[in-house]
Amino acid sequence: MTGEASSLVEVGPVSRFLEDGDRVVTKAGEHEILTLACDGEIFAVGNRCSHRPWWLDGGKVLPATCEIECTLHLGRFSLRSGAVTEGPPKRPIRTYDVEVIDDVVHVRVPSSVSGS
């Protein structure tokens, strides 16, 4: 998102992301962002599978590889890059930068989708 106007959206305290798979869905304008923990890190991705209109927030998190698996067709995405790691999806999912400020998790979103 370099060079793009953006804003921070508060997600919640770091304490909500202590275990692999701990997750929160945040609305940012018309977009839903899935923020979740994996292998000691916090990631934020778009909450919809790129293959079919299906939510990812119910998906299984694979801690060994930091992937999320869509429950509809078992496609997998990297939480780090959004890349497809196992089909049937062909397109990546969107990722968002995560910032922790005073023990509160924030996601950086383009100003056009922040809704604030």
Image (tube, rainbow, N blue to C red):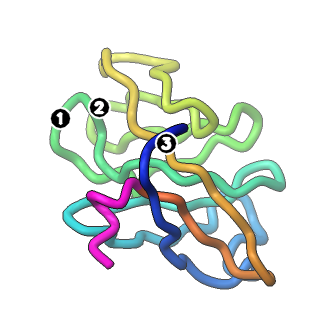
Looking at the image, residue 79 sits to the left or right of residue 16; the answer is: left
**Disc 1 to disc 2: CB gap under 8 Å:** yes
Among the 4 quarters of the image, the one containing residue 27? bottom left
Q: Residues within 10 Å of mark 1 (few under 14, many from 20)?
A: few
Residue hosting label 2: 73
Q: Secondary structure at mark 2?
A: loop
Q: Nearer the viewer, residue 72 or 24?
A: 24
Mark 1 or mark 3: which is in front? 3
Q: Nearer the viewer, residue 71 or 50?
A: 50
Residue 75, image x and y in percent?
Answer: 39, 28
Q: Nearer the viewer, residue 58 or 45?
A: 45
Tell me which numbered mark, 1 or 3, is placed earlier along the sequence: 1
Among the 4 quarters of the image, the one containing residue 30? bottom left
Residue 77, image x and y in percent?
Answer: 49, 31
Question: In the rendered view of the protein, which quadrant contains the C terminus?
Answer: bottom left
Residue 79, image x and y in percent?
Answer: 58, 39
Magenta stretch in the rendered image: 110-116
Tell me which numbered mark, 1 or 2, is placed earlier along the sequence: 1
Identify the amino acid type marked 2.
His
Mark 1 or mark 2: which is in front? 1
Give the vertical position of 2 relative to 58 (above or below).
above
Q: Nearer the viewer, residue 16 or 2?
A: 2
Q: Residue at x 17, y 35 (%)?
A: 52
Residue hosting label 1: 52
Q: Residue 95, labelled with which disc?
A: 3
In reply to whether residue 113 is colored magenta, the answer given is yes
Q: Residue 106, labelled with which disc?
A: none
Mark 3 or mark 2: which is in front? 3
Q: Secondary structure at mark 3?
A: strand
Identify the amino acid type marked 3.
Thr
